[in-house]
Amino acid sequence: MSKIHVSTEINGDQVEFLCETDETLLDVLRDQLGLTGAKEGCGTGDCGACSVTVDGRLVCSCLVLGAEVEGSAVTTIEGMADGDALHPLQRHLLEGAALQCGICTPGVLVAAKALLDKNPDPSEEELRYWLAGNLCRCTGYDKIIRSVMTAAAEMRGEKS
Amino acid sequence: MNVKRKFKVLGTRPVRPDGVEKVTGKALFGADTYATGMLHARILRSPHAHARIVSIDTSAAEALAGVKAVITSADFGEVDSEMTRDTMHNCMANGVALYDGHAVAAVAAISKSVAAAALKLIKVEYETLPHVTDVDAAMQPDAPVLHANRQHRSVVAGTPGNVVYYCDFGHGDVDAGFAAADKVIERTFKTAATHQGYIEPHACLANVGSDGKADLWCSTQGHYNVRLICAEIMGMDESQLRVTASEIGGGFGGKTTVFIEPVALALSRKAGKPVKLVMSRDEVFRASGPTMSASMDIKIGMNADGKITAGHAKLRYQGGAFPYQMVMMGAMSAFATYDLEHVRAEGWDVMTNRPKMISYRAPGAPMAVYAVESVIGELAAEFDLDPIDVRILNASREGTKSSYGPTFKAIGLVESLEAAKAHPHYSAPLGANQGRGVSCGFWFNFGGQVSVSMAINADGTVNLIEGNPDIGGSRASISMMAAEELGIPYEKIKTIIGDTASVGFSDVTDGSRVTFAVGIATINAAKAAKAEMCKRAAKTWGIDVDAVEWIDGAVHPTGHNAGEFPPLSLAEIAANSGRTGGPIAGHHEGAPDKAGVSFGVHLVDTEVDPETGFTTVKRYTVFQDVGKAIHPSYVEGQMQGGAVQGIGWALNEEYIYGEDGRLQNAGFLDYRIPVASDLPMIDTVIIEVPNPGHPFGVRGCGETAIVPPLAAVGAAVCAAAGVRLFELPMSPPKIMAAIDAKK
Ligand code: FES
Ligand code: FES
């Protein structure tokens, strides 16, 4: 089976890879590029653990083919912190103990950031519906919701 | 009253040591490692609920370019222990496929796509057999029996063959108790099987060398247990199999055994290369352990003042395709909350053509307690009594002889009930179509075997190695206990989970045991290190070791003959250790057993849409006695997470089997776990009645919280919809049917 050559941008870097025609973006990221921050919880678009953005749009990378990101800009959890400086979302999830096992955390962070990029001041309800695609079996979501709301307030420059 | 000790570190909320890796995507979970020359494996699974495997032809798969190994049960040897043999036959069917999804063959190939193509080339000839998936049907004399002659000696002679275990707990004379009651209610309940639903599928990477040594990396709650089982299946010495636990993406009991690890090891041995094996979500549902489903008869007598005169539970659990013993936990938990004169709980464990059950958070307890608490709620309503008052009147206390035998030491049930009654939630007004529910819950908590090794570094920092995978922040709580005992800052401690070759045996991370048992071992290891540091200081000062003592992170001279010396801190003693006798360390191995039971009380408000039967959870509060909360945020997290799993069990989650015995909803779309938009905030109230069996008062806290939600939500839904339901999940069609039946 001949492979497809793809050039794309990932977390700001130009990247080239060869992928099989049916290979998902998630598999390319994890198996070829060593970016294992995105997780496969289901492979069917139901859990959000594989969340990344493609050209600013939040997607389940298990439902995107590697070949589809030719010429796009992809961001993953690995691109969220600025060097050693954590993004406020990352910092607040940590401080708020919003992760237990942490397998859902990369997806939650990528999804929450995508929301705040569009809507810096979501209501609790908007946030809950936005994150409804990110399953977390450990936390009951309480601390995730609180931490994201606190991070959003800080990013808006409000005092917590 | 308990004199509460003042702590410096315990009760604070530091950031967990493994946190940054987990928010940056760097933490390595089961599927996140790769080896040079690694092969990808896939498993072929039975499409039948019950079928004899007539033949398996793997020749076409083996001939496919890129396929390096194909295995079937013929590639596994004999094992002596019955339990391990069952586990092995669950990992790979031995002549008979016992459930939809049972593994029948596996391949390892150079890529995922070649492995997938190879699966399609394996030809299996099946002869289908009659099947049974329902517990009551499986107990009938004419039901197809999964394994002949596997009944435990507890089973009464003549009982149909799928019944593999029977238990009977209690005291007093229940018939006399019922005769004395003002009212007796008897109900039958059913609860569906639910899955632990961890987001990370089972994953492992096995590498068997030509010298017979092997390395195994896997997502597990207990890598020593994995080693034990896999070494026996592979015919290896335990010392030759090194198992490393990856970061674990949830388990809840579901990762306390093996499903794929022996398959990966066998493939690696055959191919002579590292083999990675990762389950798909479909496989997780079809072939890793869900919990039991249940059918239960509950009979309870009560007097008009709310006093329970007697309780009798008959619990019938099905746990899938192999013999097991888990109903015992349900029978012991059913009435543990209450101080009863006459009580009896019987249980039957039953085999069916479903995946082999495995523990799920407080295994066996939630369904039994759901049934008992539902009847108590109904009786309280009969007599127009406050449901919390009734529970306080009958509650187990210190000195109560429990329904399963032992006498309780200090416990916090009454405190939890009183806190619930006094909470603003309990008196808040309800809206239209809303109802409030309350339920108690109980879990034993375990101790078990544990090993901890602690090195005091020359720069005054501490490395701690323990053997229990950290499933929800335990590295933080262990580091905190070490810091408290050593009197040094939390940040100076680094706790890691060692592989099976680097620290002694540790039991599985289960039974809410880690903070309790690893905590005790950590405290004792710290005590050993402190004793050594006292010796070093005494040596430095040239005085007797009896003339020094450890106070707050430093050694001080003590008594009037000791002499005047400025105290030596841990860091100073450590820095000098090379000149006073070499490295300083402490370790502890043991099996602490005073885990301390824990109780919780949940309050919930729900709203039921009378047009659709759809339930919304409006408000939720968890009260739980945790003994001592080491890291309160992670304790709250356990209370919240358990509550939400219980909400899912009550409202949505169920294994649905068709007439053909096949699972119909093996995915997160159709097996619906609660999502963020389904829920309100989950409020928590931590109650601390110290466990006398732990130096800091710790009780296990992880499991209790899944026990009360089933009946609490059940009562709230019944109150909101004005109907009585006796079956979980309370899905909209069931609620609508009950509403329609009432009209
Ligand atoms: S792995 Fe992509 S949504 Fe679950
Ligand atoms: S923290 Fe475990 S799934 Fe979210």
Image: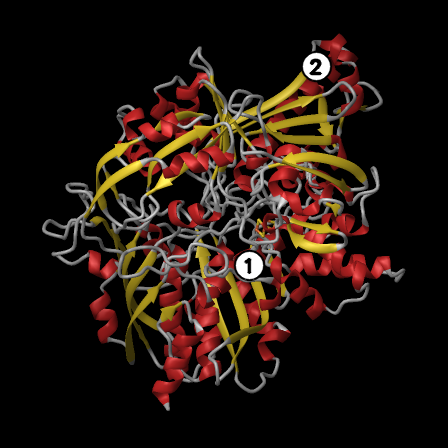
Residue in the foreground of this view, choosing between B178 and B223: B223
- The secondary element bearing badge 2 is classed as loop
Residue at the disc numbered 1? B624
Q: Mark 1 belongs to which amino acid?
A: Gln
| CA distance for labels 2 and 1 | 48 Å
Q: Mark 2 belongs to which amino acid?
A: Asp
- Which chain is home to disc 2? B
Asked where in the image residue B551 lies, by quadrant, the reply is top right
Q: Establish if B580 lies above or below B485.
A: above
Residue in the foreground of this view, choosing between B347 and A63: A63
- Residue at the spot 76% in from the left edge and 10% down from the top edge: B542
| Image-based side of B505 in relation to A20, left or right | left
Residue in the foreground of this view, choosing between B235 and B154: B235
Q: Establish if B220 lies above or below B433.
A: above
Q: Establish if B433 lies above or below B480.
A: below
- Earlier along the polypeptide chain: callout 2 or callout 1? 2
| Image-based side of B475 in relation to A151, left or right | left
The disc label shown at residue B436, or none: none
- Which chain is home to disc 1? B
Which x, y percent locates residue B595? 48, 44
- Residue at the spot 54% in from the left edge and 70% down from the top edge: B603
Q: Establish if A59 lies above or below B725.
A: above
Residue in the foreground of this view, choosing between A152 and B373: A152
- Residue at the spot 72% in from the left edge and 51% down from the top edge: A53
Residue found at the very far right of the displayed protein:
A157
Which x, y percent locates residue B743? 37, 91
Residue at the disc numbered 2? B544
